[in-house]
Image (cartoon, helix red, strand yellow):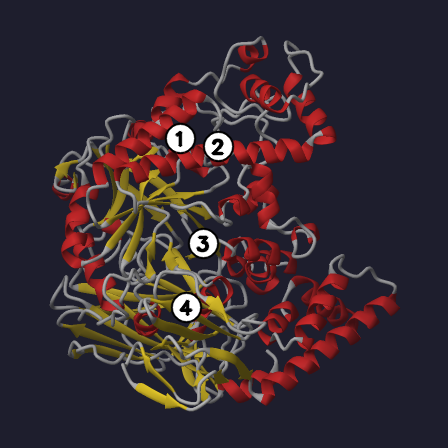
Amino acid sequence: MRNYFIAILTCGLLLSGCRTDHQQASPLRLIKSFDCTQNYTADTYFSYGDVRVTSSEVGKYREAEAKPLSRFGYRFAVKNVGKPHLAVVRYPDDKRRFMCMMDGTSYDLTIGTFTGVKEPLTHKMQEIRKVFWPRWNDCSIVFMTWGNGEPAAVADIQIYEMDHLPALNINKSGENIPTRELGLQFEDPCGMTFSMGAYTEQEWLERTISYMKYTGQNLLTYPIVWYHGPVYPSKCEPSGLAESVAAPDRTIYARWTSDLTDWVDILLKRFEEKGLEFQGALTLLRLGSLMKDMNINLDSIKAGKETYNNMLANDQVQSSTADWTVEYNVLNYEKQTTGTLKEWAYGEHNGPFGKGPMFNPLHPTVQKAILNLTVEIANRYGKSLAFKGISINMWHATILWYFSLQSGYDDYSIGLFEKETGVKIPIDQKAPDRFSKRYNYLTSNYQEQWVSWRCEKIRELIRKIRDVLTSVRPDLRLTLTMWTETTIPGWFGTPDKPEHQIFVRKSLYQLCREGGLDVKLYSNEPGIDIDYSMVPSRDRDGWGTKGVDTPLEKTCSFQDHDFLDKETLDAVAQQECPGAFIFDCWVEAWGKYSHAPCDPDDQQAKNLQVMWGKPAEGIRRSISKYPEDNFWWDSQSRITPHFQGGTYYMEYFAYALAELDACRITRGGLFTDTSHSEMIQKFAKAYRALPAKKFGTIGPTTDPVAVRSLLLNGKRYFYLVNREYYPVKVILHFSRDKSDFADLVTGQKTDASELFQVELGPYALRSFLADADTEITGFEAVIPEAIKSGLLQEAEKVKSDIAKVKNSGKELPESIGKAVFEMDSALSEKRYSYVRKILSSYPMMKVSEMVGKDDE
């Protein structure tokens, strides 16, 4: 990576943080340690591939082969199963790596970490500090290479036992002032008893509460309506829930039921007792009542029979979401297990169409089902003060919108459009191909009016959902999450072409608007919040295990748009209460996968056929077979969320606050990440002390440091946040000769006369409280000279490379002119964080790649 970063990084600034102030430490008792440079016997150590001890400038370590699924691991004994433990793993950040850590069977010890490429190397040892609850006395810890040319490596391991997880003290900024929310968010509800060392859901709940309190997080957003409907005991829709469990002998089972315990009510009562908040997540792809009565007979629809399924631009009916979610209905499980499944539940089937919502969001039948469900949720859970509302994931197949211009050409919607706009569509209403003709006519003649009308109609529906919530309790909120990890592939397939890259494809805002969600329409809508979904890691899994051989076009799109999609970022930042969801993707290696019925005499299965204290309807074995590699158990799983290494993990937290002034930040996906506790604690103490209101921005830029201020209840709150990995010196200018203010974390008071100077560490946040008269008139942000000169050199180099490509007669990337313009503008305005991001964006990296190939 670029040498000019090393001068800053070698100061050790990216090492994991230590315990935060005012938190009583739980004693750590070392129970096992491994020096990975030493040899161990086969009952303690195994390896697969060319695993060897090597060294670099950071020291000696054991390194797996730089080929996918090469791995090594260690076996250790634990006395107190179910008590919290800490695994401290040191690994070298000296070259490009993609390492998966796990116990080999469950999610309990799972974390992935990647280094290099867009994260400058620190050339130091980094630490993983994983909190876990062992479910076995006989434990293992395994390290695996994921991508080609990105070897896993570890120097040493320490395993500690802890007495408990002490709760983090969060200083409140004032009585009765709602403060910002920081928390966990899940996409998948199937992993409760496959993570946190839990055999039962109640164990998972108690350990989740303990970890949230330990790290200072106060909000949990968790699915209550998933792919096929409610996962709570609904009276208006068919319900169902399935989950995995890793058994005492390591056998992996899946269990399921449609006779659910009201676990949400149990959770809310515990959250009330512990002062935590819950928001129900709705993916909302299907509802059983709609599936049961849908008409997907294409011939009958063409002949004029009504349907509330979406009709498409190619004269097809959307008879499926056309994705992986179809099988996750509990109605399918028993037949899958016995091999008697002939068709998916309700006859859902694919066709000659892409991914999209099955049901028309404007049709009265669809709206009635959605609103009835909302009424039930609000009435059932709205009385709990721990319940904060619902969050709807705007996916490629969510039935709250059309998703794209390819959908929505049914007879009902077109008739309503004609009635409300006066536009007459000159298409025979009985023509069997009327749907495609309507699409062609509208997009050729009235596209803007058609898009605007659909956005207004979707807003009407969203307002109705909001009104249901607030009629039960005025402070309940509806959150819409602009999800990208599922929508981008829905629009483009794998985003692996030049036309999918930044400054070429449409912005996320424009794409969502074409699908019926115009974010700008909600900027002044009380009770409706917008969360912007960011995806730190999807570009790094490369949609496979090719690693260094992954084409550049597959490795840039998500991060580039996270940081450089100005139109979308501005639209979210203009919301009254913007939020951010940092989605942690995962990689999966299933091996040869199958499921099988449990043996009639499998007493363990009988004991585990329980969900939330109630007998489950079914249980089966889940089997993944991998090449033999001397691992001690046959029952295995290799599914791993992956994170930026070291303090780079905090980049998206700092960025969400600096760019959006995010009033809430959630992070997660598959299960609770318990590997970055100290970093989250430090951020939580400063972030959760801030009022949950939009602050005013000080100065003309928030790059590389954002300074914002809020006057509230006769006091002035202000914060400083550094969005970069290097330290930045900040000099604040005040309007008064004498300014008294206090740090909201430590309570330490400062008397600054006109000037206040502070060094913000990497991704650091500082929060303060002052008198109302203490006004900030401006500030200066000074970055290290080595960073500044390095960025300038890199900018000149890319311009030189552009000239070389031009002179060679080769075609430059389409967006290179826009990229250079934006880079020069950012340099002139000293927006150095933006400069760094655009230097590592697709058009710039493509030019460097082209020059590099010419030089070979």
Q: For the residues marked 2 and 1, what is the alpha-carbon distance in whole angstroms?
A: 9 Å
**Sequence-wise, which precedes: disc 4 or disc 3?**
3
Residue 153: image tag: none
**Are there few (<14), some (14-19), or many (20+) residues within 10 Å of tag 2?**
many
**Sequence-wise, which precedes: disc 3 or disc 2?**
2
593 or 784, which lies in front?
Answer: 784
Q: For the residues marked 4 and 1, what is the alpha-carbon distance in whole angstroms?
A: 43 Å
- In the picture shown, does residue 61 fall above or below 276? below
Q: Nearer the viewer, mark 4 or mark 2?
A: 4
Residue identifier under label 3: 576
In the rendered view, does 57 fall on the left or right side of 16? right
Inspect the image, locate mark 2, and give the three-letter code of the amino acid beneath it: Thr
In the rendered view, does 172 fall on the left or right side of 610? right
Q: For the residues marked 3 and 2, what is the alpha-carbon distance in whole angstroms?
A: 33 Å
Residue identifier under label 2: 321
Inspect the image, locate mark 4, and give the three-letter code of the amino acid beneath it: Leu
Q: Nearer the viewer, mark 2 or mark 1?
A: 1
